Image (spheres, rainbow, N blue to C red):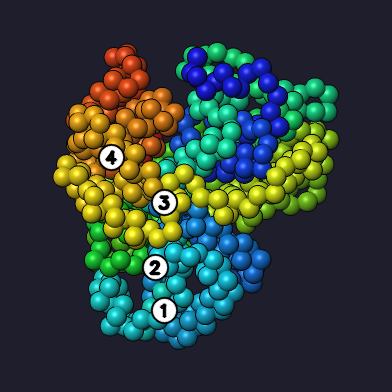
Amino acid sequence: MRPWLRDLAGRTFDVLVIGGGACGAAVARESALRGLSTALVEKGDFGEGASAHCLKMVHGGIRYLQHLDISRLRRSCQERAALLRIAPHLVSPLAIAVPTYGWGRRGKPFLAAGMTLYDLLSADCRRQNADPARRIASTQLLSPSEVLEQFPLLERDGLTGAAVFEDGQMHSATRLVWAFVAAARAAGTSAANYLEAVTLLRRGDRVEGVTVRDRLSDDVFDVRARVVINASGPWAEGLLESGRIEPARYRGTYSRDTCFVVDRRFSSSLALAVQGKGSDSDTVVGRGARHMFLAPWRDKTLVGVWHRVVERQPDEVDLSREQLESFIDEINSVLPPLQLTLRDVRMAGFGLVPFGETQQGGATLSFGHESKVIDHAARDGVRGLITVISVRYTVARQDASTALDLAASQAGLKFNDVDSTTVPLPGGTIDDFSALLASARGDTPHWLGQSGIESLVRNHGTGYRQILDLAASQPALARVVDGTDVSLAEVAHACRQEMVASLADVIFRRTQIGTGEAPSGVAIEQVAQVMRDELGSTDRDLERDRAVVSHHLRRYWAGRANAAHGGGT
C-alpha cells in the first residue's frame, strides 16, 4: 500500500474532497488552513483533466463589464490579485493588445472608455500586491504605427491603434494545481491520487463518506467524513447517482474548450486578442463572432479558445483532425499572414467545462455564467454532501471558500478564521520575484544554463535551491533531460516529494517536459531510469507507463500533428 493511503482508512475526517483538479485542490487547501481534518482523493493524477489543458489565462473579468456585472468583475479581479500574490512564481501579468478599427464598438474611443472604467473598478485590487512585477498595470493606448510595430501581420485598413490591458498567465497550470495540493498536505490534508470514489456511503438522509478503489492495487476501502464535497467536475453526476440522488436534476451542458500550442514565438511580448468568425455549422458556444487570443507562453505561442458544446462524456471527449484543422483555418482567416498549418501545432489542449442552463424544479440553473455550490441538504434532503462546480481556474479558490462556509454551516464545523489569499503557496514566499530570479541567475550551475534556471525558479519558486542542492549532492542528476530545460534532479525530486506514480505524472504534470510538445524518446528513457532508481519501477511498470505516455501524446496532438500523420476520431 502506498504510504499516504494509511492516513485515509480507519478515521472520520471533518471534510472529504472528491476531485483533485484546480477546484478540489483549492477546497482541500482552504479546509486544511481553517484547521479542519481533511482528506482529498483523485481518481487519476492531480490536475490531469481540464485544469491541465487550459489556455493558462487568469482572467480578471473584463468581459463582465459589457453585461454590467460589476460584482463578478470585482470578484475575478480580487482572485487574480490573490493568485499573483500567493503564487508569484507560477502566475505573472500578461499584457494583451486589442486592435481597434473605425469609430464604432471596435473603435479606440469606445474601447478606451470601457477599459478606463475597468481600471477604476479594479484599482484597489491592482494595488494589493507589494511586488511591482506582480501588479496589474492600467490600460495603455497604442497608435497604429506602434501596434503594427508589435504585430505587422494585422490588417491595416481602418486600423486606429490598440488598447492594451493586463490579465494573468500561468507558467504551468499543472504545477499550480500541485502547489495547492502540496499546500493542503503541508497543512495536514491526507491526499491520494489514483484513488477513485466509487460509491457514496449513505445512511438514511446522511452521506457519511465514500467507498474508494485504489486504481494501482485494486484495494477497496471506505473513507469517512462529516461532510463530503463533490468537486469532480463532469464526473460529479455519476457520484451523485451512486448516492441515490437523481443526477438529472443537476445535469448541465458542457463545453469542450480547446486551445493549441504553436512552435512560433512572435517578436512582441504582448498577447493579441482578435475577433474570430465563429461557425454556424457547428454546435458552438456563443455562436458567431468570438474573441481569440494568441499569447506568448514560454518559447512558443498559445492560440485559443474554441468552445464547442458536446455530450458530457469526460472519459471519451476527443479532438479530431478535422476539428483542429477547422480551428487553424479560422485563425488564418482572421490573420492571413500567419499561414499556420497542422505541422506548426506542437500540442492541443482540451477539456470539459460547464456551460449552459439546466432546469431544476421549475428553476433555471445557469452553469456557463457562474460557479455553482449545491447544498444537497436544502435541495435533496441529504445532509453531509455538497457539490461545487467551478467554471474557471481564476475563481477556484473563491468557490472553495464558499463551499467550506456552507459545509461548516451544514455540519456545525468550527474552524479558524484564516484569509487564504494572504498565505503563499509552497515556493511562493517571494517579496520581489525579479530579485529572486536575478539572484538565481547569478548562481546558475554551468550544466543548467540561464533558460534552465529560469524554468526551475518559475516552477518551484524559492524551492529551486533544494533541487540545485540535490544535483550538487548527486552529480549523476546534474544534467538536463534531452531537448528540455528540466534537470534530472527535478525529476528525482518529483519522485521523492511529489507523489508521482507513473512516467506520465512526471512528464506531463510535475515537470514541463511534455507540457508544450512531445518529448523525445531519449527524454522518456532518461525519466524512466530515474524512476527505476528512485521508486524501484520495474520494466513491466515502465512498459505500461510508456503506453500511457504514447496515448496521451496522440490524444493531445503532440507529435502526430507536426508529423502530419494519423487522424482523430
Rendering coords of residue 106 (x, y %):
46, 78
Query: Callout 4 environment at 10 Å: few (<14), some (14 to 19), or many (20+)?
Result: many
Pointer 3 or 2: first along the chain? 3
* x then y, percent, for residue 224: 69, 24
Q: Which residue is mark 4?
A: 468
Disc 2 residue type (three-letter): Ala
In the displayed structure, 65 sits above or below 89; it is below
- Between discs 4 and 3, the one toward the N terminus: 3
Tell me the kind of residue under disc 4.
Answer: Leu
**Mark earlier in primary sequence (2, 4):** 2
| Residue type, mark 3 in image | Leu
List the residue tagged with mark 2: 95
Q: Toward the viewer: 95 or 348?
A: 95
Classify mark 1: helix, strand or loop: strand
Instruction: Identify which residue, 307 or 486, lies in the foreground.
Output: 486
Q: Please, what is the three-letter code of the amino acid marked with disc 1?
A: Gln
Q: CA distance from mark 4 to mark 3?
A: 19 Å
Tell me the mark number nearer the camera, choosing from 4 and 1. 4
- The residues tagged by marks 3 and 2 sit, at their Cα atoms, a distance apart of 16 Å
Q: Earlier in the sequence, mark 4 or mark 1?
A: 1
Mark in the foreground, 3 or 2:
3
SS class of the residue under badge 2? strand
Q: Residues within 10 Å of mark 1 (few under 14, many from 20)?
A: some
Q: Is residue 408 left or right of residue 161?
A: right
The reply to whether discs 2 and 1 touch (Cβ–Cβ < 8 Å) is yes
Q: Looking at the image, which residue is at 64% across and 33% down?
A: 38
